[in-house]
Amino acid sequence: MAAEWGQDVPWRPRDIWLSLLVGLGLSAGLIGVFFIGWSLADVRASDTILFSVLTVLVYAGFFAGVYLIVVRRRGVSFSDIGFVRVRATTLALMLPITVGLQLVLGIIVFASSPLLGEPPSASEQLVLGGSPALSVGEVVLLLVDAALIAPFVEELIFRGLVYRYLRGRWNVIGAVIVSSALFAATHLIVPLMPVLFALGIVLARITERYRSLYPAVAVHGLNNGLAVLLVAFTT
């Protein structure tokens, strides 16, 4: 039954690449419109708020690309891609899994840093600039961005489109490794790639176990949210 899980997906690699290209174009367009409006309005905001808004626009563009190319063009629903309901107890189980995952990822960072260099800190990734203290508004924006929007769109693409397509053609190990490698590579932060690769493996295995993207979204969101809260309470 596991081998049949991804065999009936109607999308193909060209649909995935096309949706990403369209998403990239839409993201660029949204950012361009935003900066035009920003300059006309002469609004001032912190680097963190600007980063959050721009990140939301990027994810909005990629979501729209997937919707236009895969959902509309191929006539599939989001449940077909993997957003299938699971029990509340299953989602609750993702909390202790995430806590244990933090320990594993910390060990990977410690082991890989001598070879790849120190990864950027959570505060550096959140673009705090010269003002490390986060306001309440910044924390809320970052949580919405990092713990809700980013996990939803990234799981839609990497565990929904990519992993499920590969799973119908390869065995579990091959599909997990390739989808996780793509997940790590697309973030373009070399010192973080081992951590992201490991995270991708865990998320793919969770998706395989529950046949739904929601548990992976929960772990992904909790992982990102904990990073935001760590910065918020330590700066």
Image (cartoon, helix red, strand yellow):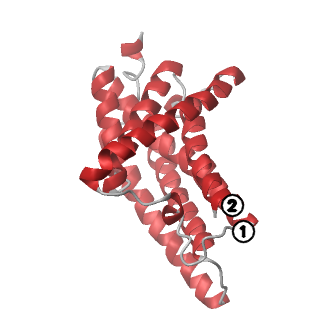
Q: Is residue 71 left or right of residue 193?
A: right
In the image, farthest residue toward the top: 1
Instruction: Classify mark 2: helix, strand or loop.
Output: helix
Q: Tell me which residue sits at (55%, 64%) in the image.
A: 57
Marks 2/1 in contact by CB < 8 Å: the verdict is yes
Neighbours of disc 2 within 10 Å: few (<14), some (14-19), many (20+):
some
Residue at 44% x, 35% y: name it. 104
Residue at 60% from the left image edge and 36% from the top image edge: 218
The reply to whether residue 10 is in sight is no
Image quarter in which the C terminus is found: bottom right
Amino acid tagged 1: Ser
Q: Nearer the viewer, residue 62 or 18?
A: 62
Determine the CA span between mark 2 and mark 1.
6 Å
The percent position of residue 70, horizontal first and vertical second, equals 45, 42
Q: Disc 1 on helix, strand or loop?
A: loop
Question: Residue 139: which numbered mark, if any?
Answer: 2
Query: Could you say which is closer to the camera, residue 112 or residue 42?
Result: 112
Q: Indicate the position of residue 148 as horizontal and vertical percent values.
A: 63, 48
Rendered location of residue 231, percent (x, y): 61, 58
Left or right for 121, reference 188? right
Is residue 220 visible to the viewer in this orientation of the structure? yes
Q: Is residue 65 left or right of residue 192?
A: right
Farthest residue to the right: give it: 136
User: Which corner quadrant of the image does residue 195 belong to?
Assistant: top left
Determine which of the numbered discs, if any, sits on residue 135 in the image. Answer: 1
Q: Residue at position x 41%, y 61% from top? A: 24
Please, what is the three-letter code of the amino acid marked with disc 2?
Val
Query: Residue 163: where, in percent of width, then height?
Result: 38, 32
